[in-house]
Image (cartoon, rainbow, N blue to C red):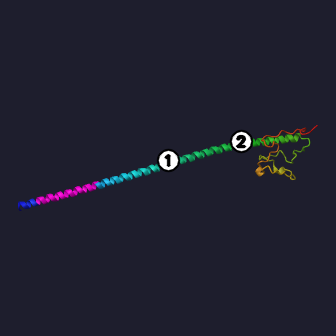
């Protein structure tokens, strides 16, 4: 082997090493570029996931607030219902007191009326001592022959609008007991 061939072999080896080094450097650049692109894609995906998580958290907080509001509304409705129940109880007690007072007035009127029957029945044929707590005298004791007066200006549905016997029309107060000399001229 002569020196010229040896030089050509060394130059060829150096060229091959240079080509391999260039190829390796280009491969590393491409791998680094791919790795950087992957990191950017991962960053974008992580940002999207954060935004999705924030939106889901906001929706969850809105649902929590709506649930708390619904619970507060339900509690408020329960308070209102309790108030209405107590008010109804007071009205029932007032009505019962009014019925008892009316019954007492009717009894006193029957006792004072010289023309009234003395057998415990009032002029209308009703037994005034048989109240059932409904605001109306017991209909079983009513005179079978009595015909109720028809009035167009009074609602007859479920007993509403019908003035209680012994009360002053248009008020909630009981009428004063009638004395034997009321309405007579002497």
Q: Is residue 119 toward the left or the right of residue 70 in the image?
A: right
Name the residue at 29% across, 54% down.
33
Residue at 64% from the left image edge and 44% from the top image edge: 80
Q: Residue furthest top?
A: 186
**Which quadrant of the structure image shows residue 101?**
top right
Give how far apart the Cα atoms at labels 1 and 2 are.
43 Å
Q: Quadrant of residue 105?
A: top right
In front: 123, or 117? 123
Could you tell me residue 109's position as x and y percent? 86, 41
Q: How crowded is the residue under tag 2: few (<14 C-alpha within 10 Å), some, or many (20+)?
A: few
Place of residue 61 in the rendered image (x, y in percent of width and height, measured from the top left): 49, 47
Q: Nearer the viewer, residue 138 or 43?
A: 43
Nearer the viewer's eye, disc 1 or disc 2? Answer: 1
Q: Is residue 34 above or below residue 122?
A: below
Classify residue 120 as left or right of residue 154: right
Q: Which residue is mark 1?
A: 61
**Residue pictured at 37% horizontal, 52% vertical:** 44
Q: Residue 154's x, y, as percent?
A: 79, 49
Q: Quadrant of residue 100?
A: top right
* Span colored in magenta: 9-32
- By secondary structure, the bulk of the magenta-drawn segment is best described as helix
Residue 4 is marked as: none
Q: CB of mark 1 within 8 Å of CB of mark 2?
A: no
**Label for residue 90?**
2
């Amino acid at each position: 082997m002569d020196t010229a061939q040896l030089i050509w072999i060394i130059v060829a080896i150096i060229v091959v090493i240079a080509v391999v080094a260039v190829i390796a450097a280009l491969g590393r650049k491409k791998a680094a570029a791919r790795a950087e692109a992957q990191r950017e894609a991962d960053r974008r995906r992580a940002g999207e996931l954060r935004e999705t998580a924030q939106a889901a958290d906001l929706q969850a907080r809105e649902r929590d607030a709506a649930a708390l509001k619904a619970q507060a509304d339900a509690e408020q409705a329960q308070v209102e219902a309790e108030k209405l129940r107590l008010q109804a109880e007071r009205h029932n007690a007032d009505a019962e007191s009014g019925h008892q007072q009316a019954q007492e007035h009717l009894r006193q009127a029957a006792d004072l009326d010289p023309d009234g029957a003395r057998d415990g029945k009032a002029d209308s044929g009703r037994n005034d001592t048989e109240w059932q707590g409904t605001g109306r005298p017991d209909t079983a004791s009513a005179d079978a022959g009595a015909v109720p007066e028809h009035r167009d200006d009074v609602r007859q549905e479920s007993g509403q609008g019908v003035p209680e016997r012994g009360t002053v029309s248009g008020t909630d107060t009981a009428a004063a007991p009638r004395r034997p000399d009321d309405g007579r001229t002497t």
